[in-house]
Image (tube, rainbow, N blue to C red):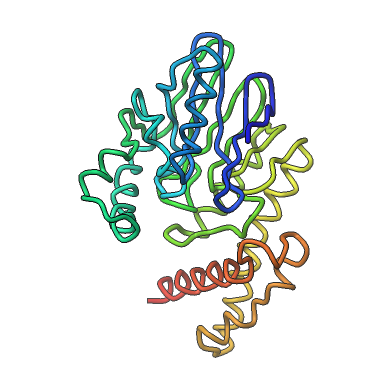
Amino acid sequence: MFTEEASGVFGVASRFVDGKNGIVVGERAALAIDCSNYEDEGQAMADFIRDKGFAPDRLVLTHGHGDHIWGGKPLKSGDVFAHHLTPGVMERQVPQALKRREVPEEVIRSEMPWPTVTYRDELQIDLGGKTVWMFPSPGHSVDGVSVYVVEDKLLFSGDSVVTGIVAAIGDGDSRILEQSLHKLMKMDIETLVPGHGETLHSKARVQDWLQWQAGYLASVRNRLQDELAAGKDAEAAAEAVDFETYIGDRLPIDRNGMPKRHRNTVDKIVEELATDNE
């Protein structure tokens, strides 16, 4: 579950769609990055931090989607750092939780890791020998941030970058995500821990994936624009953007419902283009 990606910096695997969380251990303190979809995994992260000699009282959220917050009860006792839009995104998760669990709403709310410290542009935390820099990288969600461990040139991208699934933009914007990916391309990243999927090691692999993910979004959008301009309706245009051509062997077709995820992204970009033309 815990993989040391750099000295004192750990990727934490989740069983939810090849998820990844993180832990950074400094000389004076430690912090968790996201807290999984499941409380037992959040508890394992809290126990791990205690085993390193620190209290699990610092939590960073990359965004407020459910699979990054529902495991937060064991990690929410201290400061919770997040973008200023994250509380609003978390609010939208409550109705979904009420459908899944037969408990009062106040119980669900009491268990959620509500942010105690929010920021708009960026925030740095010095853990002692480890500088954690949080900055916006939206597009997957309006509140998306990435977390860079300066000394190790290591990035926890949240769902701004995913290597185990198709780029998801269900309540985001593909154009904004593409801009964020180009922003990340300009950074010195030697290791990238995605929100879902395999950790990338080496600048070359990181750059290759960032370029591919941005190119995927752009090429899907360009094809859809051509199909719609030729007079096809939304359904026919989306059908033209097939999995094999636009993803190929980059992602396994038989894992994590990949064709459906691809179609969801295609359909969302169709919606964006329709909005542009209104």
Q: Is residue 247 above or below residue 5?
A: below
Query: Is residue 67 found left or right of 249 in the rendered image?
Result: left
Q: Quadrant of residue 22?
A: top right
The tally of labels here is 0
Residue at 42%, 23% in the rendered image: 58
Quadrant location of the C terminus in the rendered image? bottom left
Q: Can you give x and y, in whole percent of width and height, for residue 257 in the image?
A: 61, 66
Q: Can you give x and y, in whole percent of width and height, for residue 56 in the image?
A: 44, 22
Query: Is residue 93 found left or right of 243 in the rendered image?
Result: left
Q: Quadrant of residue 20?
A: top right
Q: Nearer the viewer, residue 248 or 210?
A: 248
Q: Is residue 80 above or below residue 20?
A: above
Q: Nearer the viewer, residue 73 or 8?
A: 73
Q: Is residue 26 above or below residue 173?
A: above
Q: Can you give x and y, in whole percent of width and height, for residue 146 in the image?
A: 53, 37
Residue at 47%, 59% in the rendered image: 173
Seen as rendered, the residue at the extreme bottom is 231
Quadrant location of the N terminus in the rendered image? top right
Q: Can you give x and y, in whole percent of width and height, for residue 12 in the image?
A: 59, 35
Q: Nearer the viewer, residue 78 or 134?
A: 78
Query: Is residue 259 found left or right of 113 in the rendered image?
Result: right
